[in-house]
Amino acid sequence: MFPGFDPVAFHVGPLAVRWYALAYMVSFIIALPIAKRLCRLSPEVATGEQVDDFLFYAILGVLVGGRLGYVLFYRPLDYLSNPLEILKTWDGGMSFHGGALGVIIALALFSWKKKLNFLAFSDRIVPVVPIGLGLGRCANFVNGELWGRAASPDLPWAMVFPTGGPIARHPSELYEALTEGVVLLTVMLFSATRPRLREHFGFLSGLFLFGYACARSFCEFFRQPDANIGFLSGGVTMGQILCIPMAMAGIGLMIYALKNPRRARAHA
């Protein structure tokens, strides 16, 4: 049986801090110093102060992009008939693909404003994104949401979720925390420490896009699709469809980066 977690982590006076919000906060706290260190590696692309300044852009990109992405990709008709519901973020509903687009726009705007190389700066920011992905999936698990498809009762870690009916299911949130979080973070940080890869601006950004698309597409085979969408033609899910352009963009970026090495200082 699914453990009876309290969705509220703790209270600050009358304010209830939920696990999902806490996951966001902890992610930014952990990721910020790592991103600063990455930006100082040769070739240096940004100062620590600039990374601090980007934090506001990143938070805005994640929240606005994630919410609008969920509205447009998963429930457009529902929110079209009740547009004020879009503002009720406390009721849940965030899309990683929308959040990714939001952060890309934030990176582009910030790089333009601070006269930074967009691809070079992106390469030093994206390696820490899996921290947020992993903790966010753990929060999904604690909330007992986004559970998986039916699993064999013989599967040792299969669970019966409170809102998933009486059948045993895959804890797909934990699969995603492992692949999108731990595995992707390991790959990205290892790659970011390779000087030759850092010289090819855009390669790490492409690697992240491709890596996430592969991890998410794999986990979608175990995750129950959203009830209002279900399975699409051929048995694929909306998550897998959205990963196709992401994977193609990632491959394109890596090819471009490998063909265009830049050894000059990125912010010069």
Image (tube, rainbow, N blue to C red):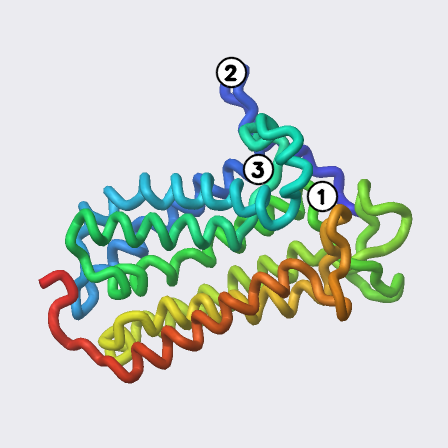
Q: What is the distance, in whole Å, between disc 3 and disc 2 at their CAs?
A: 17 Å
Q: Determine whether, in the image, residue 183 is placed left or right of residue 36.
A: right
**Callout 3 touching callout 1 (CB < 8 Å):** no
Quick check: 37 left or right of 221? left
Residue at figure coordinates x 75%, y 43% from the top left: 3
Whether residue 147 is visible here, answered yes or no, is: no
Q: Amino acid at mark 2?
A: Gly
Position of the C terminus by quadrant? bottom left
First in sequence: mark 3 vs mark 2: 2
Name the residue beneath numbered marker 1: 144
Q: Would you say residue 75 is visible in this rendering?
A: yes
User: What's the distance in space between the residues labelled 1 and 2, CA to CA?
Assistant: 25 Å
* Residue 12 versus residue 7 in the image, above or below: above
**Quarter of the rendering containing residue 158:** bottom right
Position in image of residue 250 (x %, y %):
43, 71
Residue matched to label 2: 13
Q: Residue at x 66, y 31 (%)?
A: 81
Please report contact status of discs 3 and 2: CB closer than 8 Å, yes or no: no
Q: On the image, numbered disc 3 is attached to which residue?
A: 19
Tell which circle, 3 or 1, labels the residue nearer the N-terminal end: 3
> Number of labelled discs?
3
Q: Residues within 10 Å of mark 2 (few under 14, many from 20)?
A: few
214 and 188: which is toward the camera:
214
With respect to residue 258, does 115 lie above or below? Answer: above
The image quarter containing residue 172 is: bottom right
Query: Where in the figure is residue 169, as x and y percent of width and height?
Result: 81, 56
Q: Mark 1 or 2, which is nearer the eye?
A: 1
